[in-house]
Amino acid sequence: MLSPRAAIRSVPAYHPPLAGREGLRLDFNENTVGCSPRVLARLRTFTGEDLARYPEREPVERKLAEFLGVSPSELLLTNGVDEAIHLLCQTYLGPGDEALIVQPTYSMYRNYMTAAGANVLSVSSGPDFEFPVQDLLACVSPRTRLIAVANPNNPTGTVAAQQDLLSIARSAAEAALLVDEAYFEFYGESLLSTRGECPNLFVARTFSKTYGMAGLRVGVLVGDAEQMATVRRVASPYNVNAVALACLPEALADQDYVREYVSEVRDSRSRLEQALQECCIRFWPSQANFVLLRVGSTHVLSSAFVDCMRQRGILVRDRSGDHGCEGCVRITVGSREHTDRLLVALHESVEELGLTQGATRA
């Protein structure tokens, strides 16, 4: 009887709760207003002939490389950051290798690492989700081949200092270090300019969050040119579709749109954190487009809070299942108008559940 590899059988299934998402979607860290009008205009020009051709990735990679200030040989467009993670795992991991992650974090790191046959070691973040640089360094061994760090981290919104990340790259020179900067624009700090210091450093970005193109699935992986040439061997030649490739230059050209949305998100984030502080709800100051808060000590209260918000037309994400996140909920922030609606629902839900007696910011 046909059977999958043992490593694949041990990979946990990932089932994002996409069904029944009626209401204001503040549960998946998506852009709440959508992509640039320039992207929509480009979409309207597509013809049947355009869709009949195989997509050409390289011309768009050259434009993106110029935008990011890197060489085209250092860059690979990917089908979202998920594919970038997958490609690094396929390139550098095999049975018996070790991979390191910091918990809590994006669950797909573990899934792709496990699928490659690696032994995944988890390092717990600090009591307030501080980045555990010393604990992580202590876990590096000759078998360590890949380390993945989300910066800012999901679901906490916390960040690792750039010097700490560079220290890891230097200390684990035989391992690839992936710094996932999916939420870079909301934070403003990047390791992209220092990539030349460490040939084992890779930086990933996405156009799903700030640029509002999650449905088109566009990401990018940047690294040392020699290492990227190896990663390209694993990638499909047509991994990014023609529609996404046509729209990306238009999205890059509309930086006014990006700046305005980032400004709204940062303002909305501050408003939400202020409201949580006034309600005495514990939260962790965020550098991303979401805030993690603790509404109780168990999944029962976090689930009740999610239900209360849903009843008021606001979708938020229960994160109680994440390591160290018992009783926690993650709320995406977006436009000022959407934040007005969010705060009304938040205050009503807090009052209904009697949650005003908790601790404040972490």
Image: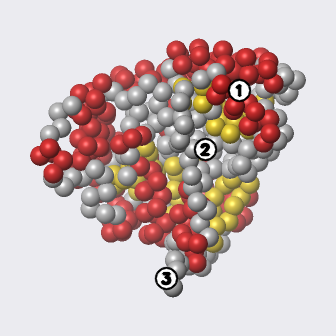
Q: Does 262 appear above or below 322?
A: above
Q: Residue at x 51, y 49 (%)?
A: 180
Disc number for residue 308:
1
Q: Are marks 3 and 2 in contact (CB under 8 Å)?
A: no
Q: Report whether 107 appears left or right of 45.
A: right
Q: Closest to the observer: 350 or 76?
A: 350
Q: Quadrant of residue 100?
A: bottom right
SS at mark 3 in the image: loop
Q: Which residue does the numbered mark 2 point to in the structure image?
A: 153
SS at mark 2 in the image: loop
Q: Quadrant of residue 155?
A: top right
Q: Amino acid at mark 1?
A: Cys
Q: Residue at x 53, y 63 (%)?
A: 112
Q: Which residue does the numbered mark 3 point to in the structure image?
A: 2
Q: Report whether 292 appears left or right of 68.
A: right
SS at mark 1 in the image: helix
Q: Amino acid at mark 3?
A: Leu
- Image coords of residue 44 (percent x, y): 21, 31
- Image coords of residue 222 (percent x, y): 40, 53
Residue 223 shows in the view: yes
Q: Closest to the observer: 160 or 87?
A: 87
Q: Residues within 10 Å of mark 2 (few under 14, many from 20)?
A: many
